[in-house]
Amino acid sequence: MARILAYTSPARGHLFPLTPILAELRRRGHDIALRTLASEVPLMHGLGFDAAPISKHVEAIDHDDWKASNPRAALVHAVATFVARAQHDAPDLRQAIADERPDLVIVDINSWGGMATAEAWGGPWATFCPYPLPLSSRDAPAYGPGFPPARGPLGRLRDRVARPLFVGMLERMLLPKLNGVRTQLGLDPFKDADAMFSRPPLLLYLTAEPFEYPRSDWPDSVVMVGPCEWDPEPEPPAWLAQIEQPIVLVTTSSEFQGDGRLIQAALDGLRDEPVFVVATLPAGDPAAFRVPANARLERFISHGPVLDRAVCAVTHGGMGDPEGTGQRRARLRGAVRTRSARGRPPGGGGPSRNPVAGETPDTGASARQGSRGDGVQGWSATHRLGLRGCRWARRRGRCPRASTHGHLEQRDRRRCAACSVKAGATGGGLACQRLPGGSG
């Protein structure tokens, strides 16, 4: 069978969605070598992967787009971060390829130097994208402003005018620095931003059509495999079974984004409500928060068991939890994506609308990582909130219950059915095997 080398950026929000695909490939008999965050290497060893840390120089470059005051500034920060990391992840992956002699390489879409190295290597390679893909389409509005799909001649005119304005801004920031990385490796420069996403022979897009704008012009290389759920701790904590009240899950980013205000606002706003708040803060200090009696604040727990019991989820705008709620929509009454006091989702992005779900693919972390790695998709119900005390929660009975309406339940069933067909990790594994060198 094949020897497969996977390389991730220093983000759990990218490693964990890839993990079930790698596990599926290992189940099919392939050997998996992995380069990822040093802190997660022991966990990956436990899954049978030949894991080693990425360069410490890559991990040392923090993602600081949360400091930006607007989406454009956040994008500037993100581009600077990925270019700085590229100077280290390019030689890091090149050395890993020399050490592992893989038949196939899978590289994180946020590892710009790694992607260029995989292309220059000349062997079969793929990338994976765990956030909304900023790829242009004649059927979708320009990436960035969050427009709904065009309707009629005026809508199409809007898109023709907006596309060069918004995409042009992205390309002016992105291409010179990205092409500088490519030139160092002897590769031809990209002419536009779309080339970055269409150049890989295979792009595993970790979502499904119902969470995207309807498109008829997806590149053949883009394969939507559906959400890839994976919990590093499959067994629920013992204290979870002791909670009798309805549970509200509140989550923040796995990378530091200065979004701790979301946690404190939810704790304060729900203090006197007949619910129990379970909050997670993987990139912050739990000791810095005021935690009421009807709440528990953990640095990290697996969200799956909590979502199975939750009546509402409040998240920072990442992609993983919303898609997780989509898999459990029959029980989850509502989901809330918050916005920061600066008028944008914590960590970046602008106000948006989704063609199906009420949110667009180009939100939240997507704007900040070009996204991250993680954008917003798959809500039962979305309430735009400021962080001044979660006012909706102070009113008895105001917790969102939009998914109890018949047409929304039907929509939710369609989404869940579409995700089931995509098969997640199985679909990702099959797509990788079809590449030359994937032994498919």
Image: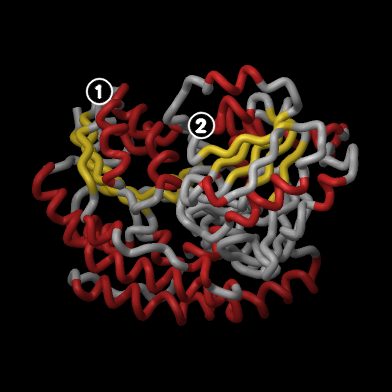
**Residue at position x 53%, y 62% in the image:** 134
Q: Classify the position of the N terminus by image quarter.
A: top left
Q: Describe residue 296's horizontal placement relative to residue 357 as left or right.
A: left
Q: Residue furthest right?
A: 396
Q: Determine which of the numbered discs, if any, sits on residue 268 in the image.
A: none
Location of residue 157 in the rendering, given as x and y in whole percent from the top left corner: 73, 76
- Where residue 420 sits: x, y (%)? 58, 28
Left or right, 225 with respect to 316, comes to left
Taking the image as shown, residue 296 lies to the left or right of residue 127, namely right
Q: Quadrant of residue 361?
A: bottom right
Is residue 139 visible to the viewer in this orientation of the structure?
Answer: yes
Looking at the picture, which amino acid does disc 2 mark? Ser
Q: Disc 2 designates what residue? A: 302
Mark 1 vs mark 2, foreground winner is 2
For label 1, the crowd category at 10 Å Cα-Cα, with few meaning under 14, some 14 to 19 and many 20 or more, is few
Label 1: state its secondary structure. loop
Element on which disc 2 rests = loop
| Residue 160 against residue 146 in the figure, above or below | below
- The residue shown at (27%, 72%) is 181
Type of residue at label 1?
Answer: Gly
Is residue 413 shown to the viewer in this render?
Answer: no
Residue 29 tag number: 1
Quadrant into which the C terminus falls: top left
Mark 1 or 2, nearer chain start: 1
Residue 120 in the figure: left or right of residue 298: left
